């Protein structure tokens, strides 16, 4: 059965299984997509704060890389297990989403008061587990309710999360800088292009992190109240062991002859590079190019902001013409943009506007591959009721591979040229993107859905 055929035969939106329509589509979609902004408020703030945490604790580039590793490992494990469990317990979806938001708040609260590097890593692990727990149930709900527009709604979910990714670093940058400052250098001279000071001095990164806790605690309550009927009623007389075996058999069968292996591999390779690059760029700007904190925050934002609109457009186009050609193009262009960032800095001997341009162009395409591979996986999962399992496995797959890549990328920065091997970090990242481009050529034009055996 083709994807087109499977979606055409889908039940009306909101009536799948005859039960999940108890929470109206617009209420469910608005809550899940809107709450994603709060869930992501610190997703890109932590990469921005990493140089200041490093300066505060005297950390090297490799130790910053371990922050990426911890986030990736614990997030990946949680996402993989969480997706499988959500498909077993659809009736607990509101609990899972609420616990996700609450855990993020607790993790960041502990991080703000942790006195040592090791305890900070432990707090980050808890926050990352909470964040990873969000995506399988949230994306699973959207994929089941809107089967004909999965690319759009998954992209919309990502774009709303990007609002949090944008707001968080900007606020953090202004608070730490004590204002809005953009520095420029020309030869041996350096000055501020513009400067606007807040009425108070810059604050510690610890206060910035801790401020998220009350927002996330309140969000967890609102999420539970609005989505308490979003899942299915509690199943009666179900053999849990048999259900686990059935779901596992469905997962394995979906990887046979459908193109799922290529989709998962591209997603994993993309995640390997993305998760390190978002830390590498602000670290390079602050430590190597000595730019102002707010200026570094703007570059983190530029890695996200353009994708809010362009990600939606790419998602809609993929629903109409297919995902393969777009994924191939984006992977190749991203590899070139990554090289452009480091080449610009090396040629100028410091900060240059070309860095900002290349970072912004990267932001146009950022997240689009993940959106499309998630939608492609959901295409294959259609009719199996395993959307959360596939999407959770994909998120876990991405983050676990990202942990290994971070060790190599940040290790190369610290171990070569006396801790100034920035070009090696960017070269390795670009190389990973190029490998993803080569693998993307193996994705079938229209991934095929295999019927689940009777």
Image (cartoon, helix red, strand yellow):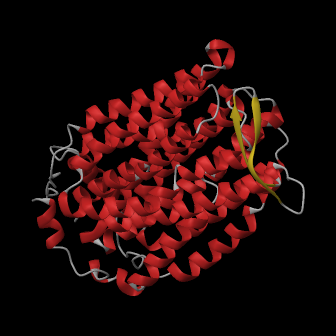
One can see residue 81 in this view: yes
Pick whichever, 365 or 258, lies toward us: 365
**Residue lying at 30% horizontally and 73% vertically, measured from the top left:** 146
One can see residue 87 in this view: no
Pick whichever, 310 or 36, lies toward us: 310
Q: Where's residue 190, x and y in %?
A: 76, 35
Residue 333, quarter of the rendered image: top left
Q: Quadrant of the N terminus?
A: bottom left
Q: Where's residue 85, x and y in %?
A: 44, 58
- Decide if residue 112 is on the left or right side of residue 321: right
**Residue lying at 73% horizontally and 52% vertically, measured from the top left:** 173
Q: Where's residue 404, x and y in %?
A: 50, 30
Pick whichever, 281 or 234, lies toward us: 281
Does residue 122 sit above or below 132 in this rendering? above
Q: How many marks?
A: 0
**Residue lying at 61% horizontally and 22% vertically, measured from the top left:** 413
- Decide if residue 37 is on the left or right side of residue 211: left
**Residue lying at 46% horizontally and 61% vertically, measured from the top left:** 308
Q: Where's residue 10, x and y in %?
A: 19, 74
């Amino acid at each position: 059965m083709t994807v087109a055929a499977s979606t055409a035969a889908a039940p009306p939106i909101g009536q799948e299984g005859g039960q999940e329509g108890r929470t109206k589509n617009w209420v469910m979609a608005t809550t899940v997509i809107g709450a994603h902004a709060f869930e992501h408020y610190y997703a890109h703030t932590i990469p921005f704060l990493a140089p200041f945490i490093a300066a505060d604790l005297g950390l090297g580039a490799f130790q910053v890389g371990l922050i990426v590793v911890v986030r990736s490992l614990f997030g990946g494990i949680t996402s993989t297990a969480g997706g499988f469990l959500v498909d077993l317990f659809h009736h607990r979806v509101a609990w899972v989403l609420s616990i996700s938001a609450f855990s993020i708040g607790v993790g960041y609260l502990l991080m703000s008061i942790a006195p040592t590097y090791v305890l900070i890593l432990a707090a980050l692990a808890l926050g990352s587990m909470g964040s990873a727990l969000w995506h399988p149930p949230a994306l699973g709900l959207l994929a089941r309710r809107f089967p004909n527009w999965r690319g759009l709604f998954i992209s919309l979910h990502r774009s709303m999360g990007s609002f949090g990714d944008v707001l968080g670093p900007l606020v953090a940058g202004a608070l730490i800088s004590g204002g809005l400052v953009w520095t420029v250098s020309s030869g041996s001279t350096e000055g501020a292009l513009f400067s606007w000071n807040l009425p108070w001095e810059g604050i510690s990164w610890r206060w910035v992190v801790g401020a998220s806790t009350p927002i996330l605690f309140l969000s967890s309550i609102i999420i539970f109240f609005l989505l308490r009927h979003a899942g299915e009623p509690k199943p009666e007389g179900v053999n849990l062991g048999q259900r686990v075996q059935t779901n596992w058999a469905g997962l394995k069968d979906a990887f046979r002859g459908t193109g799922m292996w290529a989709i998962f591999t591209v997603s994993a390779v993309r995640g390997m590079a993305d998760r390190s690059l978002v830390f590498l760029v602000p670290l390079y700007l602050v430590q190597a190019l000595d730019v102002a904190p707010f200026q570094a925050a703007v570059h983190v934002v530029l890695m996200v902001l353009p994708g809010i609109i362009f990600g939606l457009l790419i998602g809609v186009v993929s629903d109409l013409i297919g995902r393969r050609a777009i994924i191939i193009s984006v992977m190749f262009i991203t590899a070139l943009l990554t090289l452009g960032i480091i080449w610009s800095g090396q040629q100028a001997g410091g900060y240059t506007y070309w860095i900002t341009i290349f970072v912004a162009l990267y932001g146009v395409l950022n997240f689009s591959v993940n959106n499309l591979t998630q939608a492609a996986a959901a295409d294959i999962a259609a009719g199996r009721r395993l959307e959360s399992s596939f999407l959770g496995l994909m998120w876990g797959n991405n983050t676990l591979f990202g942990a290994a890549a971070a060790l190599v990328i940040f290790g190369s920065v610290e171990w070569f040229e006396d801790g100034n091997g920035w070009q090696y970090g960017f070269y390795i990242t670009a190389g990973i993107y190029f490998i993803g481009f080569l693998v993307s050529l193996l994705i079938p034009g229209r991934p095929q859905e295999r019927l689940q055996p009777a």
